[in-house]
Image: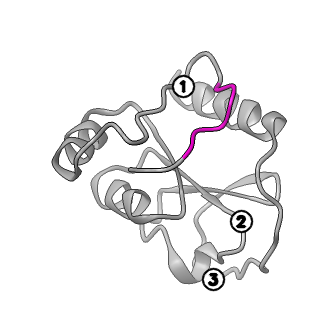
Amino acid sequence: GGGIAPDPLPSNARSLLNRTSLDELIWLTRRADFVVSVDSGPMHIAAALTDRLLSIHTWSDPGLVGPYNPKAHIWKDGQIFAQDFTVGREASDRTPTSEDIQSMAAWVDGQLT
């Protein structure tokens, strides 16, 4: 994918922004221990390939736009929860802070044990 990575990244995270083709992204996603992605095309690819996904949502409602994987998890407004298509999530302008990113990294690390 493309974009700008937050700085600094947690020590257990690696950014491959602007470094992968679509084929490489799919290859990496299939082999990843866990995928953390904003609500984007790569997130939807990950939702199709793996249950080990944390999708970051700010203004979008994950109940309406996915990820369409019932085993995926969502970050919204500072909270992580399992995907639940029956619950609407209001629009919000809150973007993840450095502390949120550290929390997400710790949560993902806990999922890998």
Q: Give the residues in magenta.
A: 4-9
Q: Say which residue label 1 marks.
A: 13
Of circles 1 and 3, which is in front? Answer: 1
Secondary structure at badge 1 equals loop
Residue at x 40%, y 34% (from the top left corner): 16
On screen, 72 above or below 104?
below
Q: Earlier in the sequence, mark 1 or mark 3?
A: 1
Residue at x 52%, y 79% (from the top left corner): 65
Q: Say which residue label 3 marks.
A: 86
Q: Are marks 1 and 3 in contact (CB under 8 Å)?
A: no
Residue 20, percent from left and from top: 28, 41
Residue at x 79%, y 80% (from the top left corner): 90
Question: Distance between the Cα atoms at labels 2 and 3?
Answer: 18 Å
Describe residue 73's horizontal placement relative to residue 28 as left or right.
right
On screen, 67 above or below 85?
above
Badge number at residue 58: 2
On screen, 110 above or below 52?
above
Q: Main secondary structure of the magenta part?
A: loop
Q: Name the kind of residue labelled 2 in the image.
A: Thr
Secondary structure at badge 2 equals loop
Question: Distance between the Cα atoms at labels 1 and 3?
Answer: 32 Å
Circle 1: is it few (<14), some (14-19), or many (20+) Cα within 10 Å? few
